[in-house]
Image (spheres, rainbow, N blue to C red):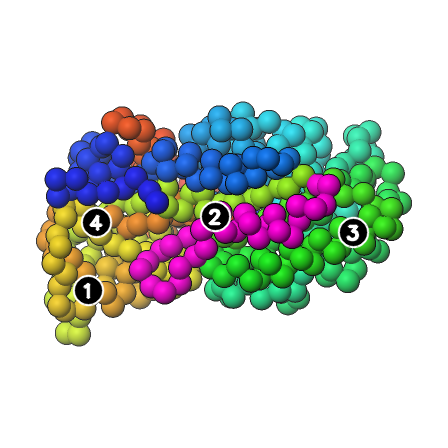
Amino acid sequence: VHHFQYRHGELYAEDVAIADIASEVGTPFYLYSRATFTRHIKVMQEAFADRPTLVAYAVKANSNQAILKLVASLGAGADVVSLGELMRAERAGIPSDKIVFSGVAKTHEEIAYALNMGIKCFNAESEPELLRINEVAKSLGKIAPVSVRINPNVDAKTHAKISTGKAENKFGIPFERANEVYQTIAECDHLKAVGIDMHIGSQITDLEPFDNAFKLMAELVEKLGNAGHKIEHIDVGGGLGIPYDNSNQVPPEPMAYAQIVRKNLNHLDCEIVLEPGRMVAGNAGIFITKVEYVKEGAERQFVIVDAGMNDLLRPTLYESYHTVQPVKEDAKLQERMGDVVGPVCETGDYIAKGRHLPHVEEGDLLAVMSAGAYGAVMSGTYNTRPLCAEVMVDGDQFHIIRPRQTYEDLIGQDSVPDWL
Ligand code: LLP
């Protein structure tokens, strides 16, 4: 459910006509709904309201300061994977004791910064990493709170590029080795095991892989407890899918997901940490682009827009489907198949492929739906195209939360040596 709906034949974001934003901001741009974001965070918080739970929003999905400020105001925490994300969370006022740090390649600098900030936990992904955290903590005279990311070797049944919980993936430690690794932690003077962690993939639309993984985690927590390793929190990662289209891949409701978490883990005396990214941000944002040309190709029609794979990479990288809607409502779809393509000089530069598209002409605006997660954050400047603007709507007001990059921003950073 989101707040991008037609009114009087025009697409609105909450109470603002999208065409009005476009005429002020230009195109392309990302557009977020505050109410939708808020709702998605609250759904998760409320599902666990009766037990100790931390919703640690996965910052990688969308890390704009305005969004993180909103996350902070709702009492949620953050899951970060780099020094940059940690600094973003810190600057937005997310309390350090609500921040967990994931990722396979934490540097000395990142570990030291996080220790000095006093984060809730490092989600460690290997033994060499644990030893490094111990060493940095020692040099700073601190005790580092750590969890071990367990690779449960379950098939999340999602796109291969975003599956992370199989034995062949680079993430985590095989669950068979968990006991040994917690023993290593116990022997390190500057580490304290506080939790256990997992994340099996993203855009998961089937509850079964979660069910299997959570069951395994519960068994592991009990086994570790018996071996003297008390686990204070269980971090179940993110991964819950969202609806991108009207196909038969209907993702479970957040409540059904919550039920699976509770069923498997409620009997343990542990705090639960969740790291949702897409589920919070995905349908809270859309992407607006303008039609430059309509070109009748030999086999199909090409709707050529002013946004490309540098702005929204998901279709190119994952063949992902995003619904494309006209901002001016048009009930009738074209009979001829068409592609929505961008200006970048690559065949892979498309937003939609082989669709019955709405009737559009030059100058019309198109809304690419479900673009709030892994949209703006994955954009780049290929073909020397400026990073586009980001806008947030709240009721009848809107604010540019990141202006479009200027050409001077883009070119002015280059430095030519004086010997040229
Ligand atoms: N926690 C960890 C450790 C993660 O690696 C991720 C996502 C999340 C939480 C959040 O997962 P979510 O709830 O958003 O599924 N760029 C890809 C998705 C990559 C996800 C990477 N990790 C895409 O556009 O589909």
Q: Residue 254, which numbered label?
A: 2
First in sequence: mark 3 vs mark 4: 3
Q: Amino acid at mark 1?
A: His
Residue 382's x, y, as percent? 37, 52
Q: Is residue 98 above or below residue 108?
A: above
Q: Amino acid at mark 3?
A: Glu
Q: Is residue 209 above or below residue 380?
A: below
Mark 2–mark 3 distance (CA, rounded to whole Å): 27 Å
**Residue on which the image places disc 3:** 222
Q: Is residue 113 above or below residue 327?
A: above
Q: Residues within 10 Å of mark 4 (few under 14, many from 20)?
A: many
Residue 310's x, y, as percent? 36, 51
The span shown in magenta is 242-270
Mark 1–mark 4 distance (CA, rounded to whole Å): 14 Å
Front: mark 3 or 1: 3
Instruction: State the image quarter where residue 286 is shown.
Output: top left
Mark 2 falls on what kind of element?
A: helix
Image quadrant in which the N terminus is located: top left
**Residue on which the image places disc 1:** 356
Image quadrant in which the C terminus is located: top left
Front: mark 1 or 4: 1
Q: Amino acid at mark 2?
A: Pro
First in sequence: mark 1 vs mark 2: 2
Look at the image and say whether residue 125 sits in the magenta stretch: no
**Which of the two residues, 131 or 359, is positioned nearer the viewer here?**
359
**Residue on which the image places disc 4:** 366
Mark 1 falls on what kind of element?
A: strand
